[in-house]
Image (spheres, rainbow, N blue to C red):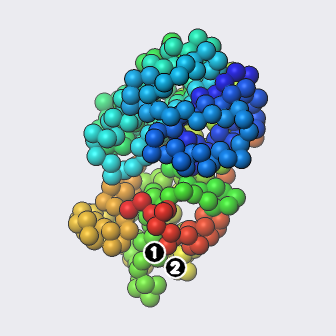
């Protein structure tokens, strides 16, 4: 095969995906675009890699991605993962990286004469405030958004979708990515981990209620499923031009998830119920939110009723035996890793 060009290394998904891709496909060269502040970490990560790997200093927010050398001629596969993944991010930096950065990557891709596949990492949550069932071939339904992360990822995917007639594109939209189903390993405690942190911060003898009705689905997917699915889609010719929800077709509701983590971490079920608006009012006070380890921006996901149809994913990956494992089959590994590492400040995001 030709060369692989990759943004988003050495991020948690990025470094795992790279290893899986080079194990599956015989790339002649692997170019890793790395922003200046991550160069040392990236160099440490590839110390045990072979000579095919080359770190390319650059920046997706710059023209030509800030690349000083010509590497376009042999690139056959381009993966764009670099983005700001943060529910609390302000609009300006999110727009600069997620939207302008993606636009620059798309322009770069257009210049690759030998490009066979452009794999773009979006998110299922480009659906914003939409409710009901969201399908993989849908994007712009004039929705609003719960935060700037969702909004800018939506704007970025618009750019990708509008250019896929010129670029052989595969769009993947993961749900909420959590740790490895086998080891529990993750590189940050956000999303559902906020609930786990909350359970550790409140003394066990204090009874905790459910937070509202918790009827919304919380779509969790382990990182190893994301890796397996993406590698498989890379090798499928029929994936070009399609969008895939890498989501759980049978997710837990927020209440079910809250109960499960309470039992696993506190050893008992929640008692009673407190209206979510009261909780949100408290969490709008930043010192209180930090004291409990839960940002206000995470709370809308407890009440937002949306279901992600994953027909493309199930039809194309099901026959290959690649499916989302049920949460109950690996939750103990997730909780074990959390309990062993929750005091590690490097993993905390809030």
Density class for disc 1 (Cα within 10 Å; few <14, some 14-19, many ≥20) is: many
Residue 26 visible to an observer of this rendering: yes
- Give x and y (percent) for residue 339: 56, 73
Between the C-alphas of marks 1 and 2, the distance is: 7 Å
Q: Which of marks 1 and 2 is nearer the N terminus?
A: 1
| Of residues 259 and 196, the one drawn nearer to the viewer in this rendering | 196
User: Which residue position is annotated with label 1?
Assistant: 199
Q: For the image shown, how many numbered marks are present on the structure?
A: 2
Left or right for 153, reference 224: left
**Quadrant position of the C terminus in the picture:** bottom left
- Give x and y (percent) for residue 16: 64, 46
Could you tell me which secondary element the residue under label 2 belongs to?
helix
User: Which residue position is annotated with label 2?
Assistant: 266
Tell me the residue at 75%/31% (across/down). 25
Density class for disc 2 (Cα within 10 Å; few <14, some 14-19, many ≥20) is: many
- Give x and y (percent) for residue 290: 32, 68
């Amino acid at each position: 095969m030709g060369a692989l060009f990759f943004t988003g290394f050495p991020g948690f998904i990025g470094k795992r995906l790279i290893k899986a891709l080079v194990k599956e496909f015989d790339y002649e060269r692997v170019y890793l675009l790395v922003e200046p502040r991550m160069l040392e970490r990236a160099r440490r990560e590839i110390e045990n890699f072979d000579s095919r790997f080359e770190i390319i200093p650059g920046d997706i927010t710059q023209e030509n991605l800030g690349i000083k050398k010509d590497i376009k001629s042999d690139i056959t596969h381009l993966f764009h993962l670099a983005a700001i993944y943060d529910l609390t991010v302000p609009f300006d930096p999110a727009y600069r990286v997620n939207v302008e950065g993606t636009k620059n990557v798309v322009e770069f891709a257009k210049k690759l004469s030998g490009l066979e596949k452009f794999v773009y990492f979006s998110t299922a949550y480009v659906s914003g405030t939409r409710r009901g069932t969201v399908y993989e071939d849908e994007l712009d339904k004039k929705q609003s958004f719960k935060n700037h992360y969702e909004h800018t990822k939506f704007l970025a995917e618009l750019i990708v979708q509008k250019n896929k007639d010129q670029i052989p594109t595969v769009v993947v939209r993961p749900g909420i990515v959590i740790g490895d189903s086998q080891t529990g390993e993750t590189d940050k405690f956000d999303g559902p981990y906020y609930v786990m942190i909350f359970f550790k911060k409140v003394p066990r003898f204090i009874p905790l209620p459910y937070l509202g009705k918790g009827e919304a689905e919380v779509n969790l997917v382990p990182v190893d499923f994301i890796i397996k699915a993406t590698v498989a889609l890379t090798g499928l010719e029929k994936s070009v031009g399609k969008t895939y929800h890498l989501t759980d077709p049978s997710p837990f509701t927020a209440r079910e998830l809250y109960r499960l983590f309470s039992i696993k971490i506190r050893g008992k079920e929640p008692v009673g119920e407190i209206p979510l608006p009261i909780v949100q009012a408290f969490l709008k006070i930043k010192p209180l939110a930090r004291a409990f380890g839960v940002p206000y921006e995470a709370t809308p996901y407890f009440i937002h009723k949306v279901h992600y149809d994953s027909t493309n994913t199930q039809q194309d990956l099901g026959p290959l035996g690649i499916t989302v494992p049920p949460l109950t089959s690996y939750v103990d590994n997730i909780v074990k890793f959390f309990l062993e590492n929750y005091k590690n400040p490097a993993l905390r995001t809030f």
